[in-house]
Amino acid sequence: MTVKKAVIPAAGYGTRFLPATKAQPKEMLPIIDTPTIQYVVQEAVDAGIEDILIISGKGKRAIEDHFDRNHELESRLEESEKEQLYNEMRHIADMANIHFIRQKEINGLGDAIYYARYHTGDEPFAVLLGDTVIDSVIPVTQQLIDAFEQYNASVLAVEKVPKEKVDRYGIVGGKQLSDKIMEVTEFVEKPDPATAPSNLAIAGRYILTSEIYRALEQTKKGKNNEVQLTDAIQLLSKREKVIADTIEGKRYDIGNKLDFLKTTVEFALRRKEFAKDFAAFLKETVKGL
Ligand code: G1P
């Protein structure tokens, strides 16, 4: 079965980014001029995904508006002959078939994914966390789909993180099948560095079979008193093979302020229209430190 659907959970409060996220979704925070979630949707589309379900929630309407058409804006751009901008705005609304469902209460990532059960049915589906952007030559979702097809198993994207940071992530442990692929038997959400099974962290991208819904039904509240997707995947691995793929790419977690700043700087240095001026400004600024 090929993977044609993706689920993007985007219901969290974004408390790490207050006050900016008091009245706007964290997924709409722009890296330069493009909301984070648009990069995430683009990654899914680049991997051949045609249908996306965004799990939204209270205060997330701006995401729906962003992927909808804005006829008034389009006519204004057309009248003022801003053709390129006009085309860009049309493109955003045409990227994929995007659907929305609201998570009724904040109850964890596992609970958010459970809302997708009627939408994805028996099909395997991709999960892309809405606050993580990954820059890579081959879209990470594509890398996972390739592994899914090769191993016929649910796949988690993982990357090595420094040992002292394992308590920020879901961490996996198991048997290495190749340089990149591990058959996973242990999944721990935000472990203590002293007891973590490895330093391989779940990087915010997954391909899951529909069995995950059965597992979620049996998953009790875990870390932070929330239903954790990591715990459900642990249950899934008792019934089906689950693998971890060490992805190629650079992950940007825009959920915290310092990483967001770094992401903005790196992305700005790649933008043709102002990379040169911006680099000169940075050099000048660094000199003064
Ligand atoms: C979530 C997942 C965690 C994963 C992380 C990646 O945690 O629960 O397993 O490693 O995303 O960013 P959160 O960052 O939402 O606390």
Image (cartoon, rainbow, N blue to C red):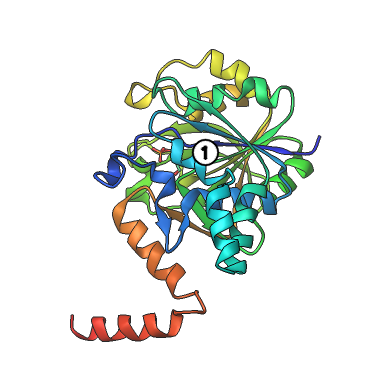
Query: Where does the image place residue 244, in percent across and percent down from the top left?
Result: 60, 43
- Ligand 1 is found in the corner quadrant, namely top left
Q: Nearer the viewer, residue 187 or 46?
A: 46
State the quadrant of the C terminus. bottom left
Q: Residue furthest left?
A: 289
Image height of 173 relative to 158, above or below: above
CB of residue at label 1: within 8 Å of ligand 1? Answer: no
Q: Quadrant of the N terminus?
A: top right
In this picture, is 164 found above or below 248?
above
Q: How many marks?
A: 1
Tell whether 281 sits left or right of 203: left
Q: Residue at x 59, y 69 (%)?
A: 81
Position of residue 158 relative to residue 124, above or below, is below
Q: Where residue 220 sits in the image (x, y, percent)? A: 44, 15
Residue 140 seen anywhere in this rendered image of the structure: no
Q: Residue furthest top?
A: 218
| Residue found at the far right of this picture | 1
144 with respect to 224 (left or right): right
Question: Residue type at mark 1?
Answer: Glu
Of 10 and 191, nearer the camera is 10
Mark 1: few, some, or many residues within 10 Å (few <14, many ≥20)? some
* Quarter-of-image position of residue 205: top right
x 44%, y 20%: residue = 104
Disc 1, SS: helix
Provide residue 61's location: percent of width, then percent of height: 45, 36
Is residue 86 placed above or below 243 in the rendered structure? below
Q: Which residue is mark 1?
A: 64
Q: Where, by quadrant of the figure, is residue 24 drawn?
A: top left
Residue 162: horizontal and vertical position, in percent? Answer: 38, 54
Could you tell me which residue is drawn at 31 percent across and 80 percent down? 282
The answer to whether any part of residue 162 appears in the image is: yes
